[in-house]
Amino acid sequence: MENQRQYSRLDHLVICASRTLDTLCVKARSKPAPDLIGGREYPATAAEDDSMSARDRTLAGRYMRVNHVGEICAQALYQSQAITAHNDTTRKQMQQAAVEETDHLAWCEQRLDELGSRKSVLNPLWYGASFTIGAVAGMAGDKWNLGFVAETEKQVVAHLDDHLGRLPDKDERSRQVISQMRSDEASHAEQAVNAGAAELPTAIKGLMTLASRFMTRTAYWI
């Protein structure tokens, strides 16, 4: 049996740079990665409701743009946390989550296209800020790295629950996409806790909430 290739930190940096360019410059698509599970089908199976008004389509597009930005941030967070992880188990967990988030990114982009909406023009800013935050969390140690993942995903689940309640009643396709994303995010949080995530201080959780609110309110419009 062949030995599995061991990647150096430099290898991971090069891979990360390539994925950064893919995330920001290439149309997202669900695709498998070596040794990882990904490339799932688009979850929106309901027929498009042609009776959706232009106003409802615009509203749904804004919510899906916010969710797309969230997935841009997730790519940055998981890639930087994988690079700075202190052990291979944590690194592999971050890489697997990043692959699953790539599915989400592709789904959000496809739904934006269907709605005739657009991505946020500030995506490079969101990516850069999130990458920095993820790197800091990773350098603090694996238990804090995992703790940051757990808290981030818990907040994302709450955010998606809010969107499910705000989407236009006739927009079942967006609702199916968000519901699958919510299930995945909740699973990521549970996996991080089971892997030994530390409970973050209340002040850090509060700062994360404020940053999330700024991002979502800005991405809704820009």
Image (cartoon, rainbow, N blue to C red):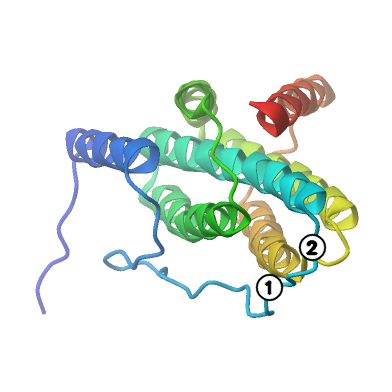
Q: Judging from the image, what secondary structure is the residue with disc 2 in?
A: loop
Look at 55% across and 41% down and name the residue there: 118
Look at 76% across and 27% down and name the residue there: 217
The quadrant of the rendering that contains the N terminus is bottom left
The residue carrying pointer 1 sits among few (fewer than 14), some (14 to 19) or many (20 or more) residues within 10 Å by Cα, namely some
Residue on which the image places disc 2: 52
Q: Which mark is residue 206?
A: none
Look at 54% across and 42% down and name the residue there: 74
Q: Is residue 35 above or below residue 116?
A: below
Q: Judging from the image, what secondary structure is the residue with disc 1 in?
A: loop
The quadrant of the rendering that contains the C terminus is top right
Instruction: Answer whether residue 68 is visible to the viewer in this image.
Output: yes
How far across and how far down the image is residue 162, in percent? 86, 49
How far across and how far down the image is residue 136, in percent? 51, 22
Front-most of residues 204 and 168: 168
How far across and how far down the image is residue 39, in percent? 41, 70
- Amino acid type of the residue that numbered disc 2 sits on in the rendered structure: Met
Residue on which the image places disc 1: 48
On the picture, is 190 further left or further right than 101? right
Front-most of residues 138 and 63: 63
The residue carrying pointer 2 sits among few (fewer than 14), some (14 to 19) or many (20 or more) residues within 10 Å by Cα, namely some
On the picture, is 86 further left or further right than 219? left
- Amino acid type of the residue that numbered disc 1 sits on in the rendered structure: Glu
**Is label 2 in contact with label 1 (beta carbons under 8 Å)?**
yes
Look at 78% across and 22% down and name the residue there: 210
Q: Is residue 25 above or below residue 108?
A: above
Q: Quadrant of residue 176?
A: bottom right
